Each structure stands twice: as C-alpha cells, then as structure tokens.
Image (cartoon, rainbow, N blue to C red):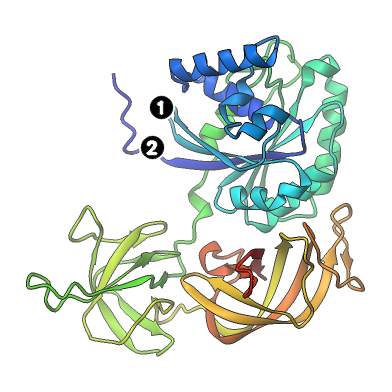
Amino acid sequence: MALDRSNIDLLRFSVIGSVDDGKSTLIGRLLYDSKSIFEDQLQAIEESSKKRGDERVNLALLTDGLKAEREQGITIDVAYRYFATPKRKFIIADCPGHIQYTRNMVTGTSNVNLATVLVDARHGVVEQTKRHTFIASLMGVKHIVLCVNKMDLVEFSEERYEEIKAEYLSFISKMDIPDVHIIPISALDGDNILESSEKMPWYKGNSYLYTLENVHLGSDFNMVDCRFPIQRVIRPQSDKFHDFRGFAGRVEGGVFKPGDEVSLLPSGFKTKIKNIETLDAPTVEEAFHPMSVVMTLEDEFDLSRGDMIVKEKNQPAVTQDLDLMICWFTNDALKPRGKYVMKHTTRDVRVMVKEVQYKVDIHTLHRAEDDSNIGLNDIGKITVRASKPVFTDLYKNNKGTGLVILIDEFSNETVACGMVV
C-alpha cells in the first residue's frame, strides 16, 4: 500500500556537534537504513568512496555535496535532506562543526524543533559541544538528543557512556531545555540507529529513529498570541479584481478566523477579518503558524509592509529599546555605539548599540560583565535603540516576532542574529 503522507506531521531537526564526531555519517546511516536513498545516489557514493580509497562505503558523502567538503572530509555549509517513515516526515539540517562556520550552524538550527548533538565517545563533551548546545538553547530548541557516537571505539563501554551522560546533564541543567534524550550509538555500523543494538544490552532506552518518530511537538507552537506581520499588499487592479485589497504574509502565532476582531499596528485601528485565502483555497476557516495566507479586511485602512495584524486583547510590546542575546558572526567586533540595520519580521529598521551588558563564558555559562568585546562566535547580551517602534515578543514565547538579524549598513553583511530577551 502506498504511503499516505498527507496527514503525517513534520519534524525539522538539526545534527550538530564538534568536528569529526560523525554528524554526516549519522545522517547517511539514517537515510541508508531507512531505505531513503535512491539506487543512483548509492552507486555515486560507492564510486566516490573507491576513488577516495575508503575501506567501506562512506555514507557521509550523502550530505557532503561541496567539493571542498569531500576533499577535506568536513561539513562547511548546511546541507538539508528529506525523508519519511509511516509515522512522520523529516527535514534534516546537517550543520558544520568547525568554529569558523558557527554562523552556518546557527542558520541550520534557527528553524528546527529538535537538535541532535553528537559527541565522540573517546573525547566526550568538548567546547563545541557546549557552544552548540547553548546556541540551540538560545534558539528556543525544546528537544535535545545527545548521541554518544563511536561506541565501537570504546568497546561499547557502559561506564564511558555514563561518564559522558553525567557531564552533559550537569552542563545542560543550567539551560531551559525541557526534553533531553541520551543514546549510545555507532553511526558507522548502525548500532541503536533504527533498532536497539545487541552490542549494548545494558542500554534500555529507545533507538534514535524511534525517538525522532515519537517526540511530541504539540506544545512547541504558540497558538495563543496572534501575530500576522504584513509582507506585501496585493492590489491587482484588474477588471476581475478591481476593488481587491489583500494583505499577504505568514502567520507567526495564534489562530486567525474570518469574522475575528483585530487591531492594526502601528495605527491601533480596529476592524474585522473579512476573508482568509491561500494559493490552494479561496477561503480557509482558520490560519495558524506557519501558514502563508492573504487576509482581506471589512474596512479600508492604509497598511503596508512591516505593519502587523493582531488581536485587540493580546498585543505585542511596542518599543524602541530591545535587550538582545546575540551570536556574533564576523571577524569585525561589535562596535560600541555602532549603527546597524535590524531585520525584524517583515520590517527593516536602523538601530544603535546602547550598551553591551555582558559576554557569556561558553565553558561555565557565567556572565563576564567587565568584558564588552564581542567578536567572532561570541555570545552576549546587548541593548539597542531602534529608529522607530517595533512590535515584538520575547523570543521564548514567539520565535517569529522575537528573532532579529543585524546587518552592517555599509557592507550589507549579516553580522549577528539576536533573540529578544
């Protein structure tokens, strides 16, 4: 019987960790064992493995698509792969482990429900393990799966697994991550990937795929705070749609229905939703995240890109002063009193850095309040002043309205991502 995928929910997850911990190999093994690889793909990586002189088929080549990645055996850019089982559909983000590609890791983890953190059983929890876990926590990831990889190289030692488990749980206890799973695996040989391994009878938990299939996502989405940033005003001005005025965008929170009373920001005017439509349907009964829709209103108001439609009794904060936790992406350090362009929802505003409150010590998670030098890959808390009010929520409550991007106004380079705290 053909697999009906129309009603299967979707899990987006990233695979993160330090260099050579086996991230690409884990994804390759997962795709291979779940029979999600086409024959021509398998043949291509078999030929590439022979040319490289590998002793066996190198499944990591499934995600290492760049020439430099294959030559060096590393991941540089984020690679996305898709597969499905009878229970769920998946989008995987394979993220780089090198410290100079942290910005790519942030990109890959910014829109996932779950993060798989890999550690080498021989090396245990290292600096990048901590950095990537902390960034995942900042990005609002609520589900973490720690895979203790290369258990075959430590003779499937339960004692070594328990040491790493205790160290990681002690570290992650300082963060707000409610759901943590720790699984001993061997990605190279497939132990505990699809099914429980006979080589580790002491492990009584679930396999990696079972964990991915059954993690509960229902509480991850904000279905209370109604937020609809306007991306585009649609005015066809054709004979068929002569008086049509629709507001297009993506729902970033809550549930909107035709007939709902709404407020329009920044004006504060009130009206009702006349109709909601999508590309596939002229009318939908309700719209929720992450649906992209077009709304029409009962009254005529002057709205444009960057304005927001909300519910009257549940509105975001309207402010020009923002406290941000940022991850810095470039070699050029943050400039005190520096000016940047901030992208927030569908609005671009100019901001000035008012204050650097502290920098985070990635090893201890302590706040270094006397260190205001935020450079490449540093994480810190700053305060910025926007040139005009923005409509924002705390990032922990709503990713869509709590995330910002800082851009150098002269080079147009993305210099940091920030979370409203």
- Cβ atoms under marks 1 and 2 closer than 8 Å: yes
Q: Position of residue 389 (x, y in %)?
A: 54, 86
Q: Position of residue 98 (x, y in %)?
A: 76, 42
Question: Would residue 57 be visible to someone looking at this image?
Answer: no
Q: In this view, does 252 lie to the left or right of 166?
A: left
Of the pair 281 and 81, the residue shown nearer to us: 81
Q: Is residue 227 left or right of residue 284?
A: right
Mark 1 or mark 2, earlier in chain: 2
Marking on residue 86:
1
* Tag 1: amino acid: Pro
Of the pair 387 and 338, the residue shown nearer to us: 338
The residue located at (37%, 83%) in the rendering is: 264
* Tag 2: amino acid: Ile
Marking on residue 73:
none
Q: Is residue 224 left or right of residue 264?
A: right
Q: Position of residue 141 (x, y in %)?
A: 62, 51
Question: Would residue 238 be visible to someone looking at this image?
Answer: yes
The residue located at (48%, 75%) in the rendering is: 347
Quadrant location of the C terminus in the rendered image: bottom right
How many marks can you see? 2
Q: In this view, does 359 lie to the left or right of 54?
A: right
Q: Name the residue under label 2.
A: 8
Q: Position of residue 395 (x, y in %)?
A: 60, 66
The residue located at (79%, 60%) in the rendering is: 378
| SS at circle 1 | loop
The residue located at (70%, 9%) in the rendering is: 55
**361, above or below 261, in the image:** above
Residue 23 is drawn in which quadrant? top right
